Every structure is written in C-alpha cells, then in structure tokens.
Amino acid sequence: MRIVNDIAVELATYLEEDVADVVMNLSSPPRPEMGDVAFPCFRLAKRFRKSPQDIANDLKTRFETEERDAAVELLAKIERIETAGGYLNFFIKRDYLARSIIRESIEGGDRPGTSSEGEGKTVIVEYSSPNIAKPFHVGHGFSTFLGEAVANLYEYGGYNVERFNHLGDYGTQFGKLIVAWKLWGDADALQESPIDELTRIYVKFHDVAENNPELENEARAAFGRLEQGGKDELALWQQFRDVSLREFNRIYERLGIHFDNTNGESFYSPMIPAVVDELKEKNLLIESEGAQVVDLEEFGLNPCLILKSDGSTIYASRDIASILYRKREYEFYKNIYVVGIPQKNHFNQVFAVMEKMGFPNPESNMHVAFGTVKFADGAFSTRTGNVIILEDLLDTSVAKTRAIIEENNPTMESVEIDDIAEKIGVGAVRYTFLRNGRERDIVFSWEDVLDFEGESAPYLLYTVTRCASLERRAPESLLERVQQIGDEELELLVSDDEQELLKEISRFPASVISARESHEPSVMMRQVMTIARAFNAFYHNAHILRAENEALGAARLVLAQVVGRTISAGLRIAGIEPVERM
Ligand code: ARG
C-alpha cells in the first residue's frame, strides 16, 4: 500500500530518520480494532528521554497539526490516529483504502508486486541435481519444486536467473557400474527401463563384492581409466548418462521445468588440477594420511578432502572447481544451492575453503537446505524398498485426483478430466513441498494433499476457478461497467469482509519479497492461502452478481478479479498452473 510509504515519509521527517528505517518499523496490526498501520515507539524512548506512550502522543499531535501540503493531503486519507501502549495506530479511511489497493493491484496486472530490484544482477539457482543411474526420488523432487520456486521468486524481482542442474554424473560409483555392466548388463532392459536396470546391476555388484573384494579393486581401476579418458569406459559412461537423462527429461517436461545449464560433476573434473595448483600456491593444501586436505579448524569444521590418497578427485573438489567456473563465466551476485539438510556440513566446508582461498564475498554462496519427506502410515508403499520414486508419487496423486473430479463432474469429457487431473494432481504435490518452512520434515498424507477444503493446492485452484466463473456468469452490462470502473464505485467496498480481504491482497507483494529474502516460498504461499480464505468468507456473505445495486456489484466483481489474479500469480511462482474449471 502506497499510503504506508507516505506515512513513513512523514514520520521520517518528524524524527529525522531514514524513510527505509521507518518503513522497517511499521507493521500491520493483528486485529482491525488496532488500526491498519502501527508504529511502535519503544526504541525512541532512550533518544527522547520520554515514555513510548508520550512519544506516540507527541507524534499524533504533530500529524494532526502539521500544515505542509503533503501532510494535509495524507491526513485527508486517514480516518483517525490513536495511541495505545506505546503504539501509534493509523486508521485509514475505508473508501480510500478500497480504491487505492484495487488500483495498485490492477497496475500490477498478472504479476502484482513484481519489481526491478534485481536489475543487472545474476543469480544462479542450482536445484534438482539427480544422480545418473539412480532413481529420481522424492528428495530430488523436494529440491526441484523448492528450487524452481526460489528461481521464480528471483525472476519476479527482476533478477537474471540462471537455472543450474548439477547432475551427479561422476565418481567412483561409475567404476562399479562399468564392472557390473560387463558382468551382468542386459542391453534390452537398459533401453526398456534404464534406471531399474542400472540399479539392479549396482545392487548386485555390492552383493557379490561382499564375498569378492577384488571386485572393488577392479571398480577403482575402471574409474581410474574413466578419469584418464579410456575409450571403453567413456563410451559406457556416456551411455549410462544418456539413458538416465532421457528419464529425467521426461520428468522435467511433465513439470514444465527448463534448465539453462546442466553441466554435471564430470564437467568440472578436468578443472581440478588448476584448483589443486591454486590451493598449493596459497599454501592451503596439507597432506593427511596420504590424502590432500584443507584444514578448516578455524571454522570449527573437519578438514576438507581435496584429493584421495590414490589421487582421484571427490565430490567437494568438483564443487570448488564449479564455484570458480561459475564466478568466471557468470559473475554471479548469488550462487544458491537447493540441497537437503544432510549436506550442510559439505557446503560449510566448501564455502570455508572458498573463504580461505580469498574468494570475494564468500557469503554470496548459499546453501538453501530442506528437510526430509516422510509418509503417514499407509500413505505410500513402494516396489523399491524405502526409496519413493517421484513419478510414482505424481501418478498416484493424478489418479486420486481424477477419481474426485469424475465424481464431482459426471458429465465432463474424459480428455478434459485427464488434463485437469494432471494439473491438479501434480500441483497438489508441489504445494505440499512448499507450504511449510523448508527445513521442516514433510509428513505426507493424501487426505491433506487432496483436501479440496483444506490447506491444499486444490483449494487455491478452486478459488481461482470460482473467481473466473463469476466473470463467465456476469451479465454483459455488469462486465461493461467493470471495464471502466471508477473510483466512486471502488470506494463502495467498505464492509468488514471486503476491507479484510483488501488488506490481505495488499500484503501479497511484501510476502513475495520476504519469501525471496529468506528463500522460503512458504511465506508467500501462506499469504496466498490467507487471501483465498478471506475471499471465500466474503463470497459466502455477500452477493456479487446480485448485489444491492449495479455499482456495488461491479466493484465486487473487480475485487474478485483482483483476487483471481493475485492467487494465480502466487501459484505460478510456485510452479502451479491454474485451471479454468474443476
Ligand atoms: N547429486 C547430489 C545428490 O543427489 C546433489 C548435488 C548437490 N549439488 C552440489 N553442487 N553438490 O545428493
């Protein structure tokens, strides 16, 4: 709300403070009887040697008596100012509040609250990052959904976003796969169901190696040859990579996700010798039991392993090489890793090594961590032990959604149901990964995920279709009036329900900023949910198409449009595509 800024400007003038500092201190009170904007005076007590309550009273008087034009103009938009317990509470005139919030929202179009704060800044968001030859499980799903939302939040703020997928396509496990393939590989099965076949021979390798330790040596040798560029090994590795990517790309397509850079770990491997040289030159590399490590005691961390005793490289060295590469090629403002909590220590080590190397702004590298996915009893049983494959989860969600839609819409055509069920089923899963603080574990239950009345994507999507259907059903004359809605009509939205809803709409842009700054899409998701709840309360209590008079009906329909656009914008940031009907 622009008026919040106007209030801050006045306060800043009176207090001789920065507007930005004042804005930070303004809050929206939890209850309507406490006004629309509150300014706490506690921190000023020391400076003015007065009680917060007295300061609040002084400020109130100053507001009411100030004669500068800007102040008089502002005061005309304010119903009254009250002081209570050290707070200065502003009550904005209801008609002004209605008109200004709707006008601001209309200005924002389909992207209310979008900004250009990030202009000229490149942010790398690395997410998904599955491993070649291994299943794309729900953990990678978490990274994928969260990462896409974080990337979208930055884009919404005008940043240049580079989406990275750091494929796990390198490491000693490829030596094992190569040996296992030569012993037991089935070419047909590999084409048919690549990940299943590669998992099968990988598991078999471990079973057999238990009694034949020489297999492990063979695998190490095979990886060594791969690192040296051995032809056979490279060809097999390339094949495993290709067939796995084919699987992963199918998932990305289904989810509408596109990466700008899919360089895997293998891409960075050749850059490691240069990293080792640089570490040596800076006297950071020390030998420990034959391996090369960087000591991180001053950070309270274990040493970071750079080269194993046999000279082969590891995960962390590839990450260090990749940060240097990314800086060189992208000159990033931020380099963000959306990876699970268990890798916290790994990233702390890698970032600490960067700091020791004298990397500029080491804090521009960030680990955005997330929790694990658990399943309520019976929510999911798998064919693959304890690993839950993301595709199985999505398919089940879509099938369950389809059954619900079919029941609710007996006459809907099958193709339309397919389309809607896919969007809602996938959206419901995505929402579940974004609704709570990301470091919290997710306890998955279908009852919640597909609760059309609960805290779910279906509820939000349904609210959007409700707004759209109002527009579809509205008579021509009303739509015409909506087209050229005037301030005097918007100023009719003064009921408690309408004002409550308007205020929630006005909080959407701030929730987007806060979600971006904390890398917590849940902050924005919660605001979108609050808007939906407020809209449905309004919808049940007020007539829109049959309002008391046409002017009010038109204003309410505009309000519904604004709600639909705001919720849709939030859903799109979350990667959830709204549907026409359901
Ligand atoms: N492939 C890894 C895994 O599945 C995640 C990679 C995370 N990114 C990174 N730059 N280390 O656990």
Image (tube, rainbow, N blue to C red):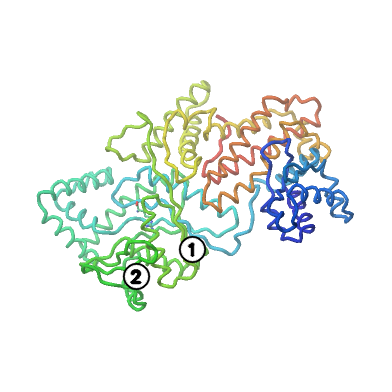
State the residue in front, 466 or 146. Answer: 146
Q: Hey, what amino acid is under mark 2?
A: Met
Relative vertical location of residue 469 with respect to residue 517 in this rendering, above or below: above
In the current view of this chain or complex, which residue is farthest to the bottom? Answer: 281
Q: Is residue 553 left or right of residue 232?
A: right
Q: How many marks?
A: 2
User: What's the residue at 50%, 34% (across, down)?
Assistant: 424
Residue receiving disc 1: 363
Q: Quadrant of residue 158?
A: bottom right
- Local packing at callout 1 (Cα closer than 10 Å; few below 14, some 14-19, many 20+) is some
Relative vertical location of residue 503 with respect to residue 19 in this rendering, above or below: above
Q: Quadrant of ligand 1?
A: bottom left
Relative vertical location of residue 179 with respect to residue 285 in this rendering, above or below: above
Residue receiving disc 2: 271
State the residue in front, 13 or 45. Answer: 45
The spot of residue 576 in percent (x, y) is 52, 41
The spot of residue 195 in percent (x, y) is 28, 46
Q: Is residue 135 left or right of residue 519?
A: left
The spot of residue 407 in percent (x, y) is 49, 21
Q: Quadrant of residue 472?
A: top right
Quadrant where the image shows the C terminus: top right
Q: Secondary structure at mark 2?
A: helix
Q: Quadrant of residue 139?
A: top left
Q: Is residue 519 left or right of residue 476?
A: left
The spot of residue 339 in percent (x, y) is 41, 52
Q: Hey, what amino acid is under mark 1?
A: Glu
Relative vertical location of residue 119 with respect to residue 505 in this rendering, above or below: below
